[in-house]
Image (tube, rainbow, N blue to C red):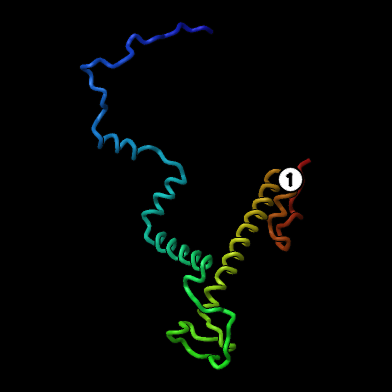
Amino acid sequence: MSEPAITSTVTAAPADVSTVVGTEEQAGAAQRDKPRGLLGDAWRDLRRNPLFWISATFITLFLVMAAFPGLFTSVDPTHGELERSRNGPSADAWFGYDVLGRDVYARVIYGARASIIVSVLATIGTILLGGGIGVLTGYLGGWTPCCRGSPTSSSGCRSYSAPS
């Protein structure tokens, strides 16, 4: 099991030998050819897609609007005056007024926060519930895969025979 120790007698490159492998262009090409993971490939593809940047801009705008509604409107969304009831769009109210005389644009801006919170919570709940059921059926096996289908389907658990 003991192998002879191999030691190098050269500790530094000789002065007359160049240590540069190639030019900077070749080094850059080697860096670009380096294999990337799935996330790196996806990010590279997304950065080149203009629809991604348009969508990301809109999503960022909506998130800023929901977080800081005072930046986009100075009107109280609950204040209403009946004499403005059902007035159309104008310079004072871009979307007009509702039946109670409230500014519809201000209500949309302030209502964005609740919509975003509901959508994020629904997504998280779906991921947790679906992931939990998937892990449970994958781990337990046996009869649990038939529970993943619809309970009203004709190929439900009736056709499944448990291993003996």
Left/right of residue 21 with respect to residue 37 in the rendered view? left
Quadrant position of the C terminus in the picture: top right
- At which x and y percent is residue 23? 23, 33
Helix, strand or loop under label 1: loop
What's the residue at 48%, 89% (across, down)? 88
Nearer to us in this view, 128 or 90: 90
Tag count = 1
Extreme residue toward the left, this view: 16
Left/right of residue 48 with respect to residue 23 in the rendered view? right
**Residue that badge 1 annotates:** 142
Quadrant position of the N terminus in the picture: top right
Q: Is residue 16 above or below residue 64?
A: above
Extreme residue toward the right, this view: 164
What's the residue at 25%, 35% (across, down)? 24
- At which x and y percent is residue 6? 41, 9
Q: How packed is label 1: few (under 14 Cα within 10 Å), some, or many (20 or more)?
A: few
What's the residue at 29%, 38% (across, down)? 28
- At which x and y percent is residue 15? 23, 16
Q: Is residue 111 above or below residue 12?
A: below
Give the amino acid at mark 1: Gly
Among the 4 quarters of the image, the one containing residue 124: bottom right
Nearer to us in this view, 12 or 125: 12
